[in-house]
Amino acid sequence: MINFFDLSTKHTIIDVNRNKYVIPTLHPNRKMSMHDFIYMLDGEWKIGQDGEEYHVKKGDVLILSADRYHYGIEPCSVGTRTIYIHASCEPFDNESLSGNQKISLPTCIHASSNPNVKNCFDKVLYADSCKNNLMASVYFDALLCELQSCSDDFSPNNIAENIRQTIISSSRILKNSEIAEKFNIGVKTAETIFKNAFHVSIHQYVIDTKIEHVKFYLKNFPEMKMYEIASNLGFYDEFHMSRQFKKNVGLSPSEYRKNVK
């Protein structure tokens, strides 16, 4: 899920604070009229937003946008520490308009390699404690820019191609949820991005890729047993491989091998 923020109007910082959870705690189920930015200082948490699941860990930033329903999936780990910022939703936020004053950000961002992100959270917290609303707004805008620098590779084309390469190089039949978690996006987002780019579902591409690998083995390694091919390519067993192969090709692997001799 992509979130859009308008920098032409200053965001008002409504609330900002640090939290420490001494016992496992489920994130509240709610829809707010303001944006909720969460920086994970320690621990991990599973939180959902509008049907997408996010597993956030130390150094991650989770953006729960205004007017979207978010909810807890699993309680946070013991000792989880966060900084949160509640910022106003401005009129042109969440509208996918282009322009120099618009910033687009994924819902979950790995920010541990950029110390400026935490620094901006700390500065917003400090400015708010000093009752300096203008300074807090300026540092919040700086935070948005730093988060964008962390997510420059989060373009749909880059993600789709990276998913494709992951599928090709994997020795297993990957589940959509595994692929989505690898790229820190929701399953629905991963499926939509991939299908828009390659006009096929992730699952179908996984199967099609494996079937092409089966064909390669059948053509070039006639001595290999079916169970060996199935094992090498990550199928559950040779029967699973045969079933998928016949569904795609119209022949069983044995029939295909005879025809290519």
Image: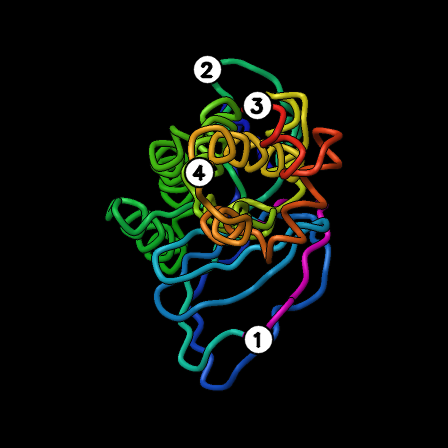
Q: Residue 99, how many percent across, how many down?
A: 51, 13
- Magenta residue span: 64-75
Circles 1 and 2, Cβ within 8 Å, touching? The answer is no
Q: CA distance from mark 1 to mark 3?
A: 55 Å
Residue type of the residue flagged with mark 3: Val
Q: Residue 231, how many percent across, how many down?
A: 49, 54
Check residue 247 for magenta coloring.
no
Q: CA distance from mark 3 to mark 4?
A: 29 Å
Residue 121 visible somewhere in the drawing: yes
Q: Nearer the viewer, residue 32 or 53?
A: 53
Query: Dot 3: within a 10 Å radius of its alpha carbon, few (fewer than 14), some, or many (20 or more) residues?
Result: few
Read off the residue under disc 4: 166
Check residue 69 for magenta coloring.
yes
Read off the residue under disc 3: 260
Query: In the rendered structure, which disc, 3 or 4, sits on the residue that comes first in sequence?
Result: 4
Query: In the rendered structure, which disc, 1 or 2, sits on the residue that comes first in sequence?
Result: 1
Q: Nearer the viewer, residue 150 or 31?
A: 150
Q: CA distance from mark 4 to mark 1?
A: 30 Å
Read off the residue under disc 2: 100
